Every structure is written in C-alpha cells, then in structure tokens.
Amino acid sequence: MTTTHGLDSGSAVGARLDALSEQEVRALDRSHVFHSWSAQGAIDPLPIARAQGSHFWDYSGKRYLDFSSQLVNINIGYQHPKIIAAIQEQAARLATIQPAFANDARGEAARLITAVAPDGLNYVFFTNGGAEANENAIRMARLHTGRHKVLATYRSYHGATAGAITLTGDPRRWPSEPGQPGIVHFWGPYTYRSAFHSETDEQERDRALAHLRDTLMVEGAHTVAAIILETVVGTNGILVPPDGYLEGVRRLCDEHGIMLIADEVMAGFGRCGEWFAVDHWGVTPDLITFAKGVNSGYVPLGGVILSDTIRATFDQRPFPGGLTYSGHPLACASAVASITAFHEEGIVDNARRLGEDVIGPRLRELQEKHPSIGDVRGLGVFWAVELVRNRETREPLVPYNAAGEAVKPMLAFAAACKERGLWPFVHFNRTHVVPPCTTTPDEAEEGLAILDEALTVADQFV
Ligand code: PLP
C-alpha cells in the first residue's frame, strides 16, 4: 500500500498515519498534545515528514541539514538501516518482557556498553532516559556510602524529574524548588566567564578545585555521598574542563570516600570523539550515567554504568529501585545494533576527526571574521559558538528581555539558518554545533558555510 509520502506501509495504522496532511498533523497536535518547556499557546511546532542520515524534511518538502542532532541525541543519524532492522526483528521475536527475567538483548547491550566503558565498570542498570539514570545513580551512591548529600554544579542540566531537576544548577531548577533535600551546588570551571575571575585555563582549574575543596569543608565531606558533573557540560554551553580538573575532582573524591558520578547523557557515545568524554582525561568515575547516543533515541533508553565495588554493596542486599521498562528488549536490541555499527563504521573516529579537521578550524576562522563571536570551544561534534554584543565586555547577545521573552538577535540568527536549510541548536546567546557523529566532512562544510552567512545577521546587533 503506497501512501502520501510514497512509502510502502504494511499495516492499516501505518497507512492511516502516513496519509495525514500537514494541516491535519498540526490540528491534532494543537488540539491534544501538551508540549515540554513551552507556553502552549505561544508555540507552533513544525510537522516533520521524514528523515534520513544527517537530514530531515518538513511536509512542504523542505530539507534541513541537522546541526542539532534533535536534542543532541541522534549520534548515528536518522533511519540507520541496521538499527531499524534490529528493532523490527526484536519486535517480531519478543517485543516486551519485564526486567526480572534474563533477556538476551539486555545482556548483550550491557556487555557492549561495559566493553567501551573505563576498566572496573562492569555492570549496567537500565532506565528509559537520562533523568532516571541520574536519579538511580544518586540512589546507588547514597546507599553505598550511607551518606545523603550530593554536590552538583551550577552550570548543569541533569533532567526534569524531581531529583534530577534539583541536581540541575541552571534556572530550569527554579520552578521546581524547594526540590529534594541534601543537594548543594558549586561552581565548575568556565574560563571565558569565570566565577573566579581567572584569565587562563590553569588559573581556572586551580581556583575551581580550591573552591570545591572549600565547599566540601563547609558542607562536611563526611556527609557527601557523591559529586555529580557533566564531564563536558552540554546545554549550559559546551564547557570543556581544563586539563587536570577532572583528575583533581577524582583525587578529592578518593580523599573523602565520595562517589564520582559522570553524567555522560549528552557527552557520551562518540559525541566528544571518544566513547565517553572521561576517556579524554583517563579518569574513571564510580558511576557513569548515559542515554541519548547509546541508541540515538530510536527507542527510549538510558542507564547507569556502575563500578564492581558499588555492585558488591548490593550483592546480598536488595537494590531498592526499578522501572517496569528497565532494559526493554526493543531499546536494548537497538543499542546492540547501534554500538555494533559504531564499531564497524568507525563512527567515534569520524566524530573526532570532524572536530579536529573541520569544525574546530573552521569555527576559529569564523571567529576571526565575525565580530559577534566571542568564544568558540568544543571537541568532537560538540561545539559552542558564543555570541556577544561586545567582545571587550563579553556582554551576551542577549536572548531574552526583562520579561523573559525571547528577543530578536538569536531569533533572527536562527531564522537565517533555517531559511538556508540548516537546523541550528540555539540556546541563550549561543549556537551549538552538534551534528550527528556520522556527518560527512562535506555536510559539515555545507552547514558551516550556512552558519557563516547567518552570522552576518548576528553581526548587525553588535
Ligand atoms: N543529563 C544531561 C547532561 C542532559 O543533557 C539531559 C538531557 O538533555 C539529561 C541528563 C536528561 O535526559 P532525559 O531528557 O533523557 O531525561
């Protein structure tokens, strides 16, 4: 049966959905769907018809090159045939089974994930996404240490469930306060807008570590179960820690018996040009949380990778946590296919080379050319371009007015990208260059050329 989009549909449901017009899709959305993070009356979500590789298409047939990877999760690109086939085969074989049973897809996914994790992290607890992974990592750290406090950074996002939004340092936390007790925030390193007035990365590293040491002292290090941080901070600006910082945090944790939780929900699975971002510094956390890139969200999946030591705590003592869909076979089969394709197709290497050879050098050239660019930073396919009104004062190209409404500069910049067929990831005064890890050098060049044109729009606000 051939449908509106020219696809062959094997089922009546597939045919019915595929036959809907753009207007019908918009009408269904506006009538019945309640959206995340938005004033419902102020949005007009674009209906998406299909996607392939690094691109997606709207109903008018307009094609967008995706420099956002959606929510920085489509690491392997759209519609990878091996993942689609694995999901279809798994659905035909065993579509669902509850987590108390052993299951081949779940076991194999855990084996493949731990095989690329740092040594000594050999167990996986599966969740449906990143926030749940962080919730459970905190629970494990608290039960393992018998302590209750958790330290998290101000410039962070850890998810939107009750505990994870309390861990979150950025303003997305405010509406959910007072939140969970026992969570304390501290400043991580960010040389360009240093909380410590540093001018160099070395100063920033040393001052941020001294600040963390002081925070532990005044909080009582013996009350702290865990320090959680995004190895490379994602939505708060792609903040790559200075060399030596994570090593220093690891040492502080060891000194005080504190668990180090690396939130690699966004930074992991190739995004930073390594399997995990911690690999850049050779640091081994006690717990790693992951989601997004593990299977690029073809079916929701996340989890916690835990050390053998933490696992031993629960050898004869029950772990008091679980989820009906933990280790869902469709999600795990898609992770098996995705990680296998990553190995077979050299996708982590591709991400590293794109950062080193194309995105990094080209963004630095754009920084020379465009007065609106204040800072460029990143690695792999995880880059931020920070836009300013004034390079001297570093005043942000303000995205919001006093009423909290988005105002012109960043909207105009984003519109200029979209008009030219590039879908950007715009957040506050930054555009993040976060294409799929499978993007080709030519596609990256094409997108960067569009960014170059769109930046002339941002330059007008300088
Ligand atoms: N942690 C980080 C670093 C994230 O970027 C996100 C989502 O963007 C999360 C956790 C939450 O993941 P999820 O939305 O799957 O719950």
Image: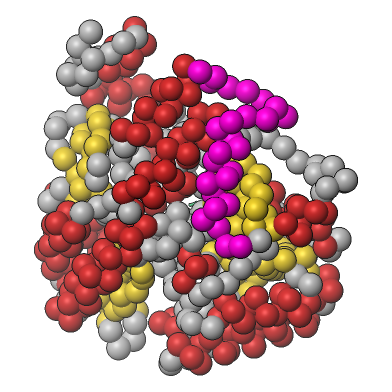
Residue at 36% of width from left, 21% of height from top? Answer: 28
Magenta span = 93-119
- Left or right: 168 as drawn, with respect to 299: right
Is residue 349 a member of the stretch shown in magenta? no
Figure check: 92 above or below 111: above
- Left or right: 443 as drawn, with respect to 241: left
Residue at 76% of width from left, 41% of height from top? Answer: 321
Quadrant of res 451: bottom left
Q: Nearer the viewer, residue 111 or 364?
A: 111
Tell me if I can see residue 319 in this picture: yes
Q: Nearer the viewer, residue 371 or 62?
A: 62
Residue at 75% of width from left, 70% of height from top? Answer: 258
Quadrant of res 154: bottom right
* Percent x, y of residue 421: 15, 48
Figure check: 230 above or below 374: above
* Percent x, y of residue 47: 28, 32
